[in-house]
Image (cartoon, rainbow, N blue to C red):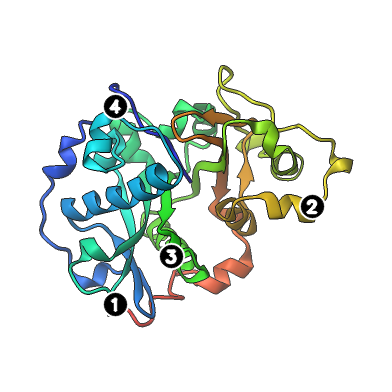
Amino acid sequence: MTIDLLDSTSVVDTSQVRSRKTIAAPATDVLGRIANLETRLARTAAEIDAAQAVRYRVFVEEMKAQVTPEAERRKRDVDGWDAICDHLLVLDTSIEGDAEEQIVGTYRLLRQEVAARAGGFYSASEFAIDDLLARHPDKRFMELGRSCVLPEYRTKRTVELLWQGNWAYALKHGIDAMFGCGSLPGVVPEEHALALSFLHHNLLARDQWAVAARPELYRTMDLMPPEAINPKKALAALPPLIKGYMRLGAMVGDGAVVDHAFRTTDVLIVLPISNISGRYLNYYGADAGRFSSSVS
C-alpha cells in the first residue's frame, strides 16, 4: 500500500535510522521461506537503506513519484516514519553478496503503540482514522505502507511471502486490525470509475469500522450506479495488491484521496483480523506456519 513522502514537518529525523545499532539478528528471525526467497525484518540500518533504494527504484524511477532533490541525489525514498517503523523484507538468497544486494521487496509496518509515541499514523494525513481508532480502544491496530517489489519478482511466490511476514508479525504483536493506503495509478479518480465504484458499492466499511477520507481531500468513489458495474471487469481493473486484500476480507473507507507526489489515487484498506477468510487462515496457518516449516 503506497503512501507518500513527508515534508519538512516529518515526525522523526531520518538520521535516527542511521544511528541504529547494526548488530545482526539471529537466523531464527526469518519469518518464512519459499525456495530461494525468504522474508524477515530488516536487521541493520544498512538493510533499511537498501530497502529505501528498492522503494526509490519502484516509486520514483518506475512510477515517477516526485521527491526532494536530496532524495533524488541519494536515490533513496526516505521519510520520517522510516526511523520508527519495522521494515519487512523479501530477499533472494540465491544472489551472491550480502543481504543488502539480495533485497527484492519490502513493506513498512507501524504498530499503534509506536505511532502513538511518535505523533500518529501516516494515513491520518489522508484519512480521518482517529474516530475509527477511538471506537476500538480494546483493539491494537497496525499500519501497512510503502509496499513494493522489483518488477522481475512480482510473482505469486513473492506476494505470498510478504503476506506470510505480515501475518507472522501481526500474530507476534497481538494485532487486531491492519490498515493502509491502497493505490491506483494516476491523479484523476474518474479514470478509475469502474474500480472505485465497485469498491464503494461492495466493500465499503460500515458501522464500527466506518472511516472516510479527510473532508478537504475527499473525492467521491461513487461514480457509477451499481447496475452499471460489471464485476468481472471491475476486478480486472483493480491493482493486484487491492485485490489481494479483498480476498482476505478487507473493506475500504469512504472516499479516495489524490496523492500528487506519488501520482496515485489512494483508498484506505481496513482489514480486521476477525474478517480474514478461513480459507486464507488455513493456507498460511493460524500460527503463520505455512512457509516457516523449513526455517531453521
Question: 66 or 169: nearer the eye?
Answer: 66
Q: Counting residues from the N terminus, which is met first, the one under dot 1 or under dot 3?
A: 1
| Residue indicated by mark 1 | 94
C-alpha separation, residue under disc 4 versus residue under disc 1: 37 Å
Question: 41 left or right of 205?
Answer: left
Q: Position of residue 170 (x, y in %)?
A: 42, 56
Q: Secondary structure at mark 1?
A: loop
Disc 1 residue crowd, few under 14, some 14–19, many 20+, Cα 10 Å: few
Q: Position of residue 216 (x, y in %)?
A: 56, 17
- Mark 2 or mark 1, which is nearer to you? 1
User: Which sits earlier in the primary sequence, circle 4 or circle 3?
Assistant: 4
Q: Which residue is mark 2?
A: 231
Callout 2–callout 3 Cβ contact below 8 Å = no
Q: Are marks 2 and 1 in contact (CB under 8 Å)?
A: no
Type of amino acid under label 3: Glu
Front residue of this view, candidates 287 and 188: 188
Task: Describe residue 221's horizontal placement relative to residue 60 as left or right.
Answer: right
Residue 138 in sight from this viewpoint: yes
Q: Which residue is mark 3?
A: 152
**The residue tagged with tag 3: helix, strand or loop?**
helix
Q: Looking at the image, is mark 4 or mark 1 earlier in the sequence?
A: 4
Say few, some or many: other residues with alpha carbon within 10 Å of mark 3 (under 14 / 14 to 19 / 20 or more): few
Numbered disc 2: secondary structure: helix
Q: Nearer the viewer, mark 2 or mark 3?
A: 3
Label 2 vs label 3: CA separation?
29 Å
Q: What amino acid is found at the position of numbered circle 1 in the picture? A: Ser
Q: Residue at x 56, y 41 (%)?
A: 185
In the rendering, at what x and y percent does residue 237 appear? Answer: 68, 50
Screen quadrant of the C terminus: bottom left
Which tag, 2 or 1, sits closer to the chain's start? 1
